[in-house]
Image (cartoon, rainbow, N blue to C red):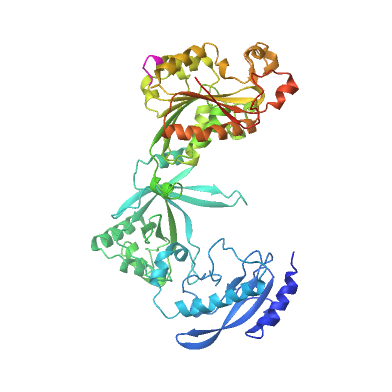
């Protein structure tokens, strides 16, 4: 590890030959920052064609040189230029994640100084509106003229409206996990029947709110972006929109107003409140909220601003795969350790819907290898996993059913693009294959289970178009698919050797870990993904797991060849 203090000392001496540098204890107006090494550097630059020395501060973080130094310019002339924080006056000179030579400390400091000089000369004294438009989010969220923080705990469901409209929504209290502080989250939608809003009302104690979206309200081209009430009115270019705003404000009193800020993933907003319409010297009703907004103490008062993130299928797609995937409808029967964790993998498709069926509920004993944890104990597994998926994506279409697979109707099964059977129940699997053989079920199926102790994991892919394989698999189901197991069938005749029992004659279960489930599904999911896109003939895939336990337990396997852990075997059906 280099002696950074000594190296900085050497750099200070060398750079002082070229620049006026002084080591200081703090930065003006930023005295609250954690004490660290700070240089005040006079950087020569052309400001509007005139040579000047610009007072600049270089603050070296504790983990320098493995974190970039901070360059800060307190001079108010530069506070509204691009790529500088109005609040901290810190320059953004490098892309996030910039790779640089940490051993060349002097070169790094020189580069920061040179970039600062070029930044001043490039942006000062010119029209920078094009720069603000590129990264308007950063500039919109700044604090200008001592105003309050921009409230960014807002979400809009669906696409940004193209016309002025009212939007319903809800507000509810959220606890910050880090420090247990409370804040208000507000969610609005263009569709008054939005299912996400309905879901939030079920999960939280909510308060109904409404907002007015004004399509013709245009924000300034450059900072500061704070606005007074009169400025808001002046920036509404459409007369009808202005009338709508006036009527809405006079009726609602406390108003949230949204408007476009040039992004397809966010909108801006302002909050109008505390308008005192009853005042001494005025008859009751003589003053309206619209009038008060531009009078009295409000004349020069900056309105609180909002930042609203867009939550839509298109936005999620842009930030994941880059595009909306083809819709996939999955039906999962059995939401135990394998089925629930398989949902985690399938949830990665950004346009998936789920039908989940399982009659069982989650118990304390399931926690060790289930997708869900303590908070879901005593909940039906299908409803609990559905809740998990909708917590992740509230707009996700998820149906929970308390039935066995064979109780479902044919039309429910044939709506799916794929059926996943993770029940461990051979009767469900036999029924499914019989229905396929008779032509009643026409969608591909994946049957998955783990053998005891995670010695292997089996996945049978059944293509209903492959008639002969369906018939063969139906016959093999009569023998519990023993032909595909890695453990010899004779071993299964000794129930106590491979399973454990709790109280009662029906309480047997196989031992394997959550890690075994993850390893098994991680091996199978690339195959599942490929088969969903490119169906093939029916086939069996076997994952080799903890075969070392077989020797410890005296369990005989069908083969000792190619049994390296995590290898994958293909078996004909």
Measuring 48% from the left and 72% from the top, which residue is drawn there? 145
Q: Per the image, is 438 magenta?
A: yes
Image position, residue 403 (x, y; %): 47, 20
Judge from the rendering whether residue 354 lies leftward or rightward of residue 565; answer left or right: left
Image position, residue 295 (x, y; %): 36, 70
Q: Per the image, is 137 magenta?
A: no
Dominant SS of magenta comes to loop
Vertical placement of residue 122 versus 252, above or below: below
Measuring 48% from the left and 58% from the top, which residue is drawn there? 151
Vertical placement of residue 572 versus 112, above or below: above
- Give the total number of marks visible in the rendering: 0
Image position, residue 76 (x, y; %): 51, 79
- Chain part drawn in magenta: 437-441
Q: Residue furthest front?
A: 561
Q: Residue furthest bottom?
A: 50
Pick the front one: 506 or 383: 506
Quarter of the image with the N terminus is: bottom right
Pick the front one: 209 or 462: 462
Vertical placement of residue 2 versus 247, above or below: below
Q: Is residue 460 visible?
A: no
Q: Quadrant of residue 196?
A: top left
Image position, residue 82 (x, y; %): 46, 71
Measuring 65% from the left and 83% from the top, which residue is drawn there? 21
Pick the front one: 176 or 500: 500
Q: Residue furthest left?
A: 240
Judge from the rendering whether residue 108 lies leftward or rightward of residue 92; answer left or right: right
Q: Is residue 23 visible?
A: yes
């Amino acid at each position: 590890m280099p002696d950074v203090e000594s190296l900085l000392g050497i750099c200070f001496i060398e750079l002082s030959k070229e620049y006026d540098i002084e080591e200081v204890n703090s930065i003006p107006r930023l005295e609250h920052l954690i004490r660290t090494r700070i240089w005040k550097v006079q950087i020569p630059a052309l400001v509007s064609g005139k040579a000047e020395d610009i007072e600049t501060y270089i603050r070296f973080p504790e983990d320098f040189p493995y974190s970039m130094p901070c360059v800060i310019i307190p001079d108010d002339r530069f506070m509204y230029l691009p790529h500088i924080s109005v609040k901290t006056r810190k320059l953004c000179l490098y892309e996030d994640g910039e790779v640089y030579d940490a051993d060349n400390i002097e070169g790094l400091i020189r580069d920061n100084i040179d970039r600062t000089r070029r930044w001043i000369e490039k942006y000062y004294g010119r029209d920078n509106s094009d720069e603000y438009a590129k990264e308007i989010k950063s500039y919109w969220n700044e604090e200008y003229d001592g105003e309050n923080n921009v409230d960014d705990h807002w979400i809009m469901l669906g696409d940004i409206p193209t016309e002025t409209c009212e939007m319903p929504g809800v507000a509810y209290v959220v606890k910050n996990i880090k420090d247990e502080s409370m804040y208000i989250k507000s969610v609005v939608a263009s569709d008054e029947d939005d299912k996400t809003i309905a879901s939030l009302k079920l999960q939280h104690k909510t308060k109904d709110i409404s907002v007015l979206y004004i399509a013709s309200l245009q924000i300034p081209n450059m900072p500061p972006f704070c606005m007074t009430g009169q400025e808001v009115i002046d920036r509404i270019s459409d007369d009808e929109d202005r009338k709508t705003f006036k009527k809405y404000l006079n009726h609602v009193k406390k108003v949230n107003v949204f408007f476009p800020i040039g992004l397809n993933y966010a909108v801006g907003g302002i909050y109008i409140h505390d308008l005192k319409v009853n005042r001494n010297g005025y008859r009751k009703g003589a003053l309206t909220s619209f009038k008060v907004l531009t009078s009295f103490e409000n004349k020069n008062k900056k309105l609180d601003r909002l930042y609203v993130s867009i939550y839509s299928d298109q936005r999620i797609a842009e930030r994941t795969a880059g595009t909306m995937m083809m819709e996939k409808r999955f039906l999962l029967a059995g939401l135990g350790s394998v089925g629930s964790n398989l949902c985690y993998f399938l949830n990665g498709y950004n346009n998936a819907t789920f039908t989940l069926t399982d009659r069982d509920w989650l118990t304390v004993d399931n926690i060790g290898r289930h997708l869900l944890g303590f908070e879901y104990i005593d909940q039906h597994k299908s409803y609990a996993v559905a809740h998990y998926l909708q917590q992740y994506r509230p707009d996700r279409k998820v149906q929970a059913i308390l039935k066995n697979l064979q109780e479902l109707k044919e039309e429910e099964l044939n709506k799916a693009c794929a059926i996943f059977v993770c029940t461990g129940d051979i009767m469900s699997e036999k029924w499914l294959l019989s229905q396929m053989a008779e032509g009643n079920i026409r969608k591909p199926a994946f049957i998955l289970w783990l053998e005891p102790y995670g010695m292997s994991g089996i996945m049978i892919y059944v293509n209903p178009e492959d008639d002969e394989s369906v018939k063969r698999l139906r016959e093999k189901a009569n023998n519990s698919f023993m032909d595909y197991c890695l453990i010899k069938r004779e071993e299964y005749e000794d129930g106590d050797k491979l399973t454990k029992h709790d109280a009662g004659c029906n309480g047997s279960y196989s031992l394997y870990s959550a890690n075994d489930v993850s390893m098994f599904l991680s091996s199978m999911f690339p195959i599942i993904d490929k088969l969903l896109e490119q169906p093939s003939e029916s086939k069996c895939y076997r994952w080799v797991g903890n075969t070392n336990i077989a020797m410890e337990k005296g369990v005989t396997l069908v083969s000792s060849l190619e049994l390296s852990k995590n290898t994958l075997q293909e078996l004909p059906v």
